[in-house]
Amino acid sequence: MRGRIADQDNLFRLSVFPASFQGARHFALSKFWNFHRLPSGSYVASVMWQRYAPTEVYLHRCGCRTAANRNEKVQSLARRNPTRHIYCGAYQFTANAIRRLKVDLPQVNFSDVYHSIEDGEIAHSEVRVDLDPGDINPEGTMTEILASLWRQSAGPLEHVCEGDEENRPHPKSKLLPAPRGPYIDSRSRLRRQLHVLRYQLLNCLWLNSDSQHPPAGPKHHSSASFMSTIKYRICKRLWQCYSPPPSQS
């Protein structure tokens, strides 16, 4: 079972060049979302959950890591003159925008978003949409879905990663203003600080404990397994903190 995200929670879709662009650095909505169709027929896309990317700083770190990982994969293929992947920024929307798709569009049978850790990114979540099997124009329905999500978006939250400063003009300049305007973080300073503290604790326990012997496991982790691991490591850390040190002979 994967963790369900509350309707009002903020999600962010990352924009990376060239995946989000058409041709010569022209931002394209269909490329930006780029839903992937599974063998089951479901359409899925990746987003970041603010609960585990609590501020713009942490969100942009996710984006920079995503672009860096793609560049490493391209380099491993030893291609000639590979296109450099460049993180440009992100757009915000809520989980409710995903769930309303099945309400607003009769061709949508199911639409939801779940926390689903991938490649060590604990903020990673998965959007899933199922269309009516009798839909005679799935491409048109997907176009309506993209338009609906775009209408509910705010941003962009632009960013230049370290090492990308020399890319001029930077492709972030081609990002389009979202219909809901700039993203404004309405949380109080105290609440943001508490969210950062929560993230740092969970991230430390998830990624850094047992760092010399990383646990084997699948590429994707469910929210349930994530929290089970966190509980185990909290108990382990508390035991290490309160256990007496070994005697010196």
Image: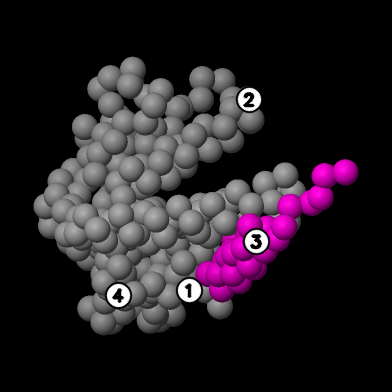
- Is the C-beta separation of discs 2 and 1 under 8 Å? no
- Which label is found at residue 242? 3
Q: Residue at x 24, y 44 (%)?
A: 157
The magenta stretch spans residue 225: yes
- Which label is found at residue 7? 4
CA gap, disc 4 and disc 1: 13 Å
Q: What is the quadrant of residue 88 in the picture?
A: top left
Of the 4 image quadrants, the one containing the N terminus is bottom right
Residue 138 lies, in percent from the top left, at 36, 68
Q: Which residue is mark 2?
A: 78
Residue type highlighted by circle 1: Gly
- Element class at badge 4: loop
Residue 83 lies, in percent from the top left, at 46, 27
User: Depth-wise, is mark 2 or mark 1 nearer the camera?
Assistant: 1
Instruction: Indicate whether 18 appears above or below 140.
Output: above
- Is the C-beta separation of discs 3 and 2 under 8 Å? no
Instruction: Indicate whether 101 appears above or below 249.
Output: below
- Is the C-beta separation of discs 4 and 2 under 8 Å? no
Residue stretch rendered in magenta on the structure? 220-249
Q: Which residue is mark 1?
A: 3
Circle 3 Cα neighbour tier, 10 Å, few/some/many (<14 / 14–19 / ≥20): few
CA gap, disc 3 and disc 4: 40 Å
User: Depth-wise, is mark 3 or mark 2 nearer the camera?
Assistant: 3
The magenta stretch spans residue 239: yes
